[in-house]
């Protein structure tokens, strides 16, 4: 049994190590890119009559608190009115539909080409809504914004010109900005993680010529790229990742523009965050299951293929994180009772993986802060908490990934938004707040006690090598358990 535990632990930590090295390589690509080009901008110098037709799709479902804000922002786009079409793809079943209808009617009277589209049957969730809207869309290009976004008026004028410089560009993706990133510890940690994705991962991959993904919102598609790739499919919960890979396998280029930003609202309660994480992680596994073999068999340079596989399979890391966490406690017992040679001395090489991922997050933080001193302050205060919360979310996310790999069908559960802009705004007692505590939450509480036993065991054996890991795991699971209950009971 001892050897079995060590073998499984070694396999899991080795796979995590290689993923961390991949992230380090992206950080290096990002640094090289920034040295080469601090900023880039594409502009269209022709008359407004030569601007291409753009359809803006706004897929919404029961967005009582933010749908008007979204419509107002898009209606204010600085783009020729005769070249702009707005589709509010509204599947709502509550009073938000009527609220949106009145707002749409108001802008119609102002001369804005906007329409509220209601499907007869809500089939295929967001992917189905986008595909349904394309049946009547007139635009050569299709911009998409989720309900929590508030794009700036110049968004189209900053992004459309990239398509005009290269006819093989199929997508232009902008960076997400966070309206409420300082609202709470949860929003701070989400912003910390997302900034790394939109800095190191997206720009690093794009600069190196690797595959990237359209992020589902705050980006624009060339209509012919959507059609050529087979259109929107609803057989995964991450329709954006799925279509992105199908398009790039067809030869379409993606352009990520870090300097163009679109503000959005981060989930403010734990259960909303969990629903979002479940969808992203399960959908990632579903897409890897669907597309993985095609990527492996594609005629691509080995470096592109390796990074594509690492990208597609990255949500599976939560399974490996959970395995290493669970096995770390019995490993303490094995180490102090059964192992003659110092396995852990040789296993310490895997700490290099932790250093690699830490460096990638530091570089990401450096891009958002004004000074090195401020960067260090923010990084030191947030990176350990981020690691703890990542471990605390590993059970929930690993379960989502596991279900994705099994091919189990689940509904597309929307992430509720409440128009939270600053610390004075309140989401509690509002509609859409989840009041039910899932069974996994109780397991998260049990896991926090499990890792507390690891802390006690390490102190008892005077073996402190895994103590920092067990402290973070204990804190992470305890925080997830605490906030899940607190936020469910607040409604």
Image (spheres, rainbow, N blue to C red):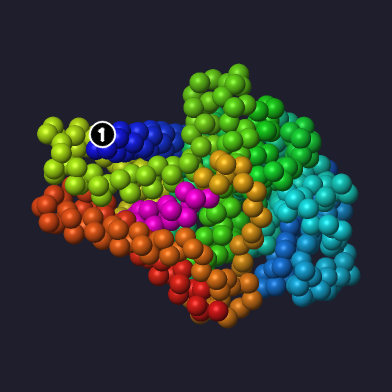
Which residue is found at the position 86% from the left and 70% from the top? 105
Q: Residue 80: x and y, percent?
A: 81, 54
User: Dividing the picture into quarters, in which one does residue 235 lie?
Assistant: top right
Residue 359 seen from this side: no
- Look at the image and say whether residue 397 sits in the magenta stretch: yes
Describe the element under mark 1 as helix, strand or loop.
helix
Considering every residue shown, the one lying at the far front of the view is 1
Q: Residue 119: x and y, percent?
A: 84, 58
User: Dividing the picture into quarters, in which one does residue 287 lie?
Assistant: top right
Which residue is found at the position 36% from the left and 62% from the top? 446
Q: Residue 225: x and y, percent?
A: 75, 35
Task: Write the start and end of the magenta stretch as one range.
Answer: 381-400
Q: Is residue 365 left or right of residue 150?
A: left
Q: Residue 233: x and y, percent?
A: 73, 42
Looking at this view, is 95 or 328 the one in front? 328
| Quadrant position of the N terminus in the picture | top left
Residue 344 seen from this side: yes
Please, is residue 145 above or below residue 272 in the view?
A: above
- Look at the image and say whether residue 227 sits in the magenta stretch: no
Looking at this view, is 47 or 471 the one in front? 471
Which residue is found at the position 57% from the left and 36% from the top? 288
Looking at this view, is 406 or 210 the one in front? 406
Residue assigned mark 1: 3
User: Dividing the picture into quarters, in which one does residue 451 lie?
Assistant: bottom left
């Amino acid at each position: 049994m001892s050897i079995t535990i060590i073998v499984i632990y070694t396999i899991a930590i080795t796979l995590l190590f290689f993923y961390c090295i991949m992230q380090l390589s992206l950080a290096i690509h990002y640094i090289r890119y920034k040295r080469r080009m601090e900023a880039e901008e594409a502009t269209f110098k022709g008359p407004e009559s030569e601007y291409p037709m753009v359809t803006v799709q706004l897929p919404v479902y029961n967005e009582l608190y933010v749908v008007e804000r979204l419509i107002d922002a898009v209606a204010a786009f600085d783009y020729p009115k005769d070249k702009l079409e707005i589709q509010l793809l509204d599947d709502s079943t509550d009073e938000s539909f009527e609220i949106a209808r009145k707002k749409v009617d108001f802008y119609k009277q102002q001369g804005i080409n906007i329409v509220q589209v209601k499907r007869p049957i809500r089939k295929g969730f967001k992917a189905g809504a986008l595909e349904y809207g394309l049946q009547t869309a007139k635009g050569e290009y299709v911009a998409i914004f989720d309900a929590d976004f508030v794009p700036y008026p110049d968004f189209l004028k900053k992004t459309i010109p990239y398509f005009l410089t290269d006819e093989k560009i199929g997508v232009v993706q902008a960076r997400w900005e966070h309206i409420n990133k300082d609202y709470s510890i949860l929003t701070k940690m989400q912003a910390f993680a997302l900034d790394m994705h939109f800095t190191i991962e997206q720009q690093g991959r794009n600069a190196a010529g690797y595959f990237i993904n359209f992020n589902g919102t705050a980006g624009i598609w060339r209509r012919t790229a959507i059609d050529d790739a087979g259109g929107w499919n609803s057989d995964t919960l991450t329709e954006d990742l799925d279509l992105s890979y199908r398009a790039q396998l067809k030869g379409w280029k993606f352009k990520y523009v870090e300097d163009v930003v679109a503000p959005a609202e981060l989930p403010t309660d734990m259960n909303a965050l969990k629903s979002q994480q479940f969808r992203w992680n399960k959908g990632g596994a579903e897409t890897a299951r669907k597309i993985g073999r095609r990527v492996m068999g594609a005629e691509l340079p080995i470096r592109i293929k390796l990074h594509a596989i690492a990208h597609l399979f990255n949500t599976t890391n939560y399974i490996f994180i959970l395995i290493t966490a669970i096995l770390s406690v019995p490993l303490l017992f094995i180490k102090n009772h059964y192992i003659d040679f110092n396995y852990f001395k040789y296993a310490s090489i895997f700490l290099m993986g932790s250093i690699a991922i830490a460096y990638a997050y530091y570089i990401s933080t450096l891009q958002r802060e004004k000074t090195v001193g401020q960067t260090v302050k923010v990084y030191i205060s947030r990176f350990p908490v981020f690691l703890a919360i990542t471990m605390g979310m590993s059970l929930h996310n690993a379960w989502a990934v596991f279900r994705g790999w099994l091919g189990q069908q689940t509904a597309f559960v929307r992430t509720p938004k409440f128009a939270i802009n600053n610390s004075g705004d309140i989401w509690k007692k509002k509609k859409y707040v989840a009041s039910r505590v899932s069974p996994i939450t109780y397991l998260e509480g049990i896991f926090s006690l499990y890792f507390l036993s690891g802390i006690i065991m390490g102190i008892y054996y005077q073996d402190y090598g895994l103590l920092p890991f067990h402290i973070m795991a204990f804190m992470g699971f305890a925080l997830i358990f605490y906030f899940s209950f607190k936020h469910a009971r607040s409604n």
